Amino acid sequence: MKAYLEASEYIDWQTPNILNKAKELAQDLSNHQDITKTCFEFVRNNIKHSWDDQLNPVTCKASDILQHETGYCFAKSLLLAALLRANHIPTALCYQRLTIEVGKPPFSLHGFNAVFLPDFDWYRIDARGNKKDVDTQFIPHQEQLAFDTVYSGEIDFSQRFAKPLDIVVQSLTKNKSFEEFANNLPDLKGLTQS
């Protein structure tokens, strides 16, 4: 579990703005499930999705995501991991490979989280942000992610990662605007399908 609690360059939970927000969100809450739900709903509802809201800058570090209040799904998963790890809750990064246009190539990765809850083991949550046809929720006995993998070539990867994939970091740090990022979405065929 130690790896899923560590701070890193992009899950920089030891920075003052992350620590302060994590403490604020956990105030008066006594168990991991309640803290996780509060942090999840904060990121889902208050951090705008860069493409949905057409916002710059393209963010990658959790502290920058919190400061600018915007990020793609990958960024939002990094912020959620930082807030939860700051509250001593083991949190991993997870990925799916999805079609960009319904049912046909090209493909892009989608990022979300898995959190370890003592009463439920690992539980996957997706703070991507709700919109028409996307309804993510925190319901520990049931998984409710933003997207299902249903089309040929789509993959729901089974791995949990302590740090973001290099291809995701490269895409988030190389592309300087939400449009540029949208035209260069990261894709990966490897890993293991669940």
Image (cartoon, rainbow, N blue to C red):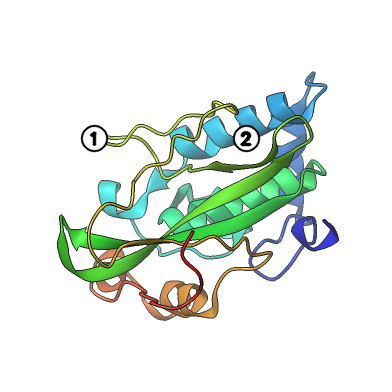
Q: Is 31 left, or right, of 132 in this rendering?
A: right
Image spot of residue 156 (x, y percent):
43, 58
Instruction: Work out whether residue 17 can be spotted.
Output: no
Image spot of residue 172 (x, y percent):
44, 71
Image quarter of the N terminus: bottom right
Q: Earlier in the sequence, mark 2 or mark 1?
A: 2
Kind of residue at badge 1: Asp
| Residue contact between numbered discs 2 and 1, judged by CB atoms under 8 Å | no
Kindly report the distance in space between the C-alpha atoms of the residues bearing marks 2 and 1: 23 Å
Kind of residue at badge 2: Cys
Residue at screen point 34% across, 54% down? 50
Q: Secondary structure at mark 2?
A: helix
Quarter-of-image position of residue 88: top right
Query: Which residue position is annotated with label 2?
Result: 39
40 shown above or below 161:
above
Q: State the residue in front, 190 or 175.
A: 190
- Viewer-side label of 2, 1: 1
Q: Secondary structure at mark 1?
A: loop
